[in-house]
Amino acid sequence: MAGIELVPIPAEEMEQEWKLPDRGTVGVIFFIVMESVIFLVFVMAYLIYIGKSLTGPYPKDVLHTPIAATICLWSSSLTVALAEKALEKERLGLFKLWWIATICLGLEFLTATGLEWKELIYEDHLTIATNLFGTTFYSLVGLHASHVCVGMLFLLIVLGVTLLGFPIQTQLRRVKFLSWYWHFVDAVWVVVFTVVYVVGK
């Protein structure tokens, strides 16, 4: 068409417009989505089989709401977020403090879970083979506990290499991904806690 001048788009702008998302970010998001689907299957199984056990013990007889452990785990989402912010500002001392606090809160949660299972197994005689409740309870809560253990392992690795002098500030991206995973573990516990200790009782 006459009188219309076509202005070419600079190559730099085209590159920015078509820039692919970070592969690590996409990978972590997909991982969390897939893990969420797995948890959904276990949660649905627990809900389906509530009240279907032919013999005891039943949830109302043996389960005690783990309020203190839950507060510890949910609080660890705050401490890991504060640690991430401290690392962004390269405040390593503060980062270590909040990171250690996250680890301690996670360990407290795992300890409480272990003590709960010890009481259920040895005092209440509830095992994974006792009845449908035992099977679905240990499967669901155990799945979550295993994810907490994995998170704790990586938290400890980060702390270890940091204390040995590794410049962890150069790995902010990976620390952020680990923080996302930990938030995911805490968010899943909201669902597990509600299903097992509120709805299930």
Image (cartoon, rainbow, N blue to C red):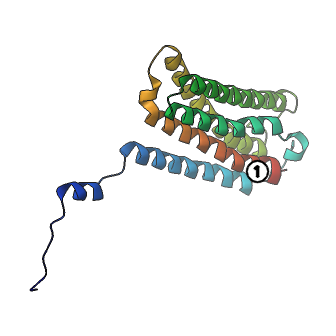
The image quarter containing residue 17 is bottom left
Please tell me whether mark 1 sits on a helix, a strand or a loop.
helix
- Residue 75: percent from the left, percent from the top? 71, 37
- Residue 138: percent from the left, percent from the top? 71, 39
Residue with the most extreme left position: 2
Left/right of residue 127 with respect to residue 99 in the rendered view: right
- Tell which of 82 and 119 is nearer to you: 82
Q: Amino acid at mark 1?
A: Thr
Q: Is residue 186 visible?
A: yes
The image quarter containing residue 63 is top right
Residue to which mark 1 is pinned = 194
Residue 200, placed above or below residue 106:
below
The image quarter containing residue 117 is top right
- Tell which of 16 and 55 is nearer to you: 16
Left/right of residue 174 with respect to residue 8 in the rendered view: right
Q: Is residue 51 visible?
A: no
Residue 10, placed above or below residue 26:
below
Which residue does the image show at 9% across and 86% down from the upper left? 2
- Residue 6: percent from the left, percent from the top? 14, 74
Which residue does the image show at 81% across and 35% down from the upper left? 68
Residue with the most extreme right position: 61
Q: Label 1: how many residues lie within 10 Å, few (<14), some (14-19) or many (20+)?
A: few
Which residue does the image show at 82% across and 51% down from the upper left? 198
Residue with the most extreme bottom position: 2
